[in-house]
Amino acid sequence: MEVRKNGVVIECVQGDIARQPDVEAVVNAANAMLMPGGGVAGAIHRAAGPELAEACRPLAPIKPGEAVITPGFRLPNKYVIHCLGPVYGVDKPEEVLLGNCYRNALRLAEEHHVQSIAFPAISTGIFGYPIKEAVQVVIPLVLSETANLKTLKRIRFVLFGARDFAYYVEYLRGQSL
């Protein structure tokens, strides 16, 4: 499923964020120390190799809403942009911090002249952000940010589960009309 806004293609796919060979940058739903873990962070670190953890070490810790960038190492992507999403019910205000993850990742992508980027559903796993509430923050923010993008031409949401994918597609369809 894809839509166009301000010359930018925004698409949703179901799949593995660590297996997106046709995008320049993938976004890691990181932990504060930027180290391997479970979920998205584990998948990205496993695919990138131990060099990724070494590159992350001096950049940590980061705070909710912040983003940093590293090379992709063994990933098929030039860059990994690491974002620390909010823990739902703990980091306040959740919607602002979640939005900052996406906004800051897009800013870093632009600064590094990235033309395509893939996002997971940040904070919706172990951090507990309800997927329905997350898409209501993420989709409108990304659509509005397209007006500020000069280099980025493709934004992909990569959803691991069928349910998350369905929520993103449904919401994006509603926003794109």
Image (cartoon, rainbow, N blue to C red):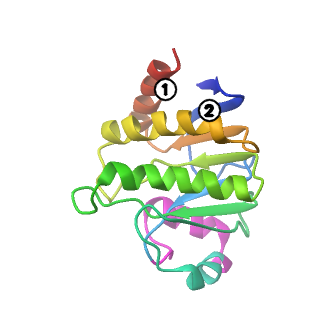
Q: Main secondary structure of the magenta part?
A: helix
> Are the residues tagged 1 and 2 within 8 Å (C-beta)?
yes
Tell me residue 90's x, y (percent): 23, 63
Residue 167: image quadrant is top left
Mark 2 residue element: strand
Is residue 38 in the magenta section? yes
Residue 69 position in % (x across, y down) = 64, 67
Point 57% across, 79% down: residue: 59
The residue that mark 2 highlights is: 10
Q: Which amino acid lies under the numbered mark 2 shown in the image of this protein?
A: Ile
Question: Compared with residue 37, is residue 157 higher up or lower down, i.e. above or below?
Answer: above
In this image, 82 relative to 9: left or right? left
At x 27%, y 56%, the residue is: 88
CA gap between label 1 and label 2 equals 9 Å
Question: Among all residues in the image, which is located at the extreme front?
Answer: 148
- Give the number of the disc on residue 94: none
Q: Which residues are magenta?
A: 33-51
Q: Amino acid at mark 1?
A: Leu
Q: Residue furthest top?
A: 177
| 89 in magenta | no
Which residue is drawn at the image coordinates 47% and 35% (left, top)?
Answer: 139
Q: Which mark is residue 172?
A: 1
Along the line of sight, which residue is nearer the eye, 30 or 166? Answer: 30
